[in-house]
């Protein structure tokens, strides 16, 4: 089954709660990051917890181990159940996030290859494979890999085996839900849902990927 994760990149608490209220019956998890947290404060995590869905902090953490640890501790104390970290900072920095996540009973996911065109300037074939290997070695729970490049997701799956693949890039970035769903564990969709005139209907239309 492929889950549907809503990327809730709206800018205010009111908008976030409104979209979550409309869509929660059709989604399996919520991901928020800098747009919403800088707009509304970290406490928005407690408000979103009322929907009783996994809540992922997409801060793409990318610092030295001590700073990564301090960031991750804030994230899990705030009520998140998972965190996304960059992998290029290296083994010790990734392990710091993984350790905090697991001590809190949460999950940690490592970015491998990003979904936008510019990602290939530095993070394409070769580097992404090494980042996926690092995710496995650090006992991360999974990776973030691009729905815009299904062939790359297949290659990264060979490395990570049964660990989770969370995949952004469907809809607004041009990725196909039908093509990517069978290759991944969770499809991340933002604008195509929260900018829709009818977010509930849009989320429902994507939720059919569960059966692909
Ligand atoms: P859209 O609106 O494009 O939102 O459906 C996608 C969401 O996913 C985030 N994003 C990524 N996160 N690695 C990540 O960790 C990526 O390659 C990547 N591409 C997109 C984006 O910030 C938004 O929240």
Image (tube, helix red, strand yellow):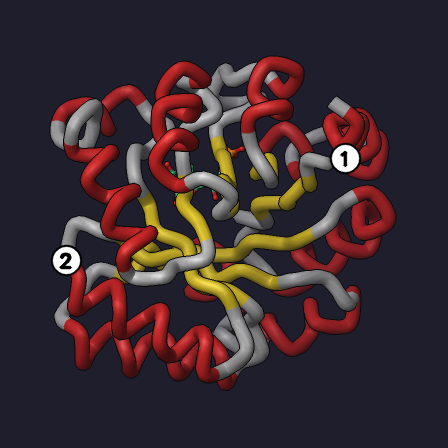
Task: List x then y, in percent, for residue 207.
Answer: 78, 33
For ligand 1, which image quadrant applies?
Answer: top left
Q: Is residue 155 among what the camera can see?
A: yes
Q: Nearer the viewer, residue 36 or 45?
A: 45
- Secondary element under disc 2, as helix, strand or loop, is loop
Q: Is residue 131 above or below residue 66?
A: above
Pointers 1 and 2 in contact (C-beta within 8 Å): no
Task: Judge depth for marks 1 and 2 and give the one in front.
Answer: 2
Which residue is depicted at the point 60% across and 72% down? 45
Neighbours of disc 1 within 10 Å: few (<14), some (14-19), many (20+): many
Looking at the image, which is closer to me, 206 or 11?
Answer: 206
Mark 2 Cα-neighbour bin, 10 Å: few <14, some 14–19, many ≥20: some
Q: Which mark is residue 203?
A: 1
**Considering only vertical position in the picture, is 211 above or below 76?**
above
Residue at image location 23% in from the left, 43% down from the top = 131
**Quick check: 39 above or below 133?**
below
Q: The N terminus appears in which quarter of the rendering? A: top right
């Amino acid at each position: 089954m492929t889950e549907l994760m809503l990327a809730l990149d709206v800018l205010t608490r009111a908008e976030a709660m409104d979209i979550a209220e409309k869509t929660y019956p059709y989604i399996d998890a919520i991901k928020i990051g800098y747009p919403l947290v800088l707009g509304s404060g970290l406490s928005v995590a407690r408000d979103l917890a009322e929907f009783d869905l996994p809540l992922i902090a997409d801060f793409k953490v990318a610092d030295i181990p001590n700073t990564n640890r301090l960031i991750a501790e804030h994230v899990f104390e705030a009520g998140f159940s998972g965190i996304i970290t960059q992998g290029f900072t290296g083994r010790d920095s990734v392990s710091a996030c993984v350790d905090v996540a697991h001590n809190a009973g949460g999950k940690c996911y490592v970015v491998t290859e990003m979904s936008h065109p510019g990602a290939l300037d530095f993070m394409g074939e070769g580097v992404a494979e090494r980042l996926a290997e690092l995710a496995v070695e650090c006992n991360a729970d999974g990776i973030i890999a691009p729905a815009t490049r299904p062939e790359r997701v297949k290659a990264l799956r060979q490395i990570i085996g049964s660990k989770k693949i969370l995949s952004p890039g469907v809809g607004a970035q041009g990725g196909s839900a039908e093509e990517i769903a069978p290759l991944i564990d969770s499809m991340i969709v933002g604008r195509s849902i929260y900018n829709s005139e009818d977010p509930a209907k849009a989320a429902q239309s994507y939720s059919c990927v569960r059966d692909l």
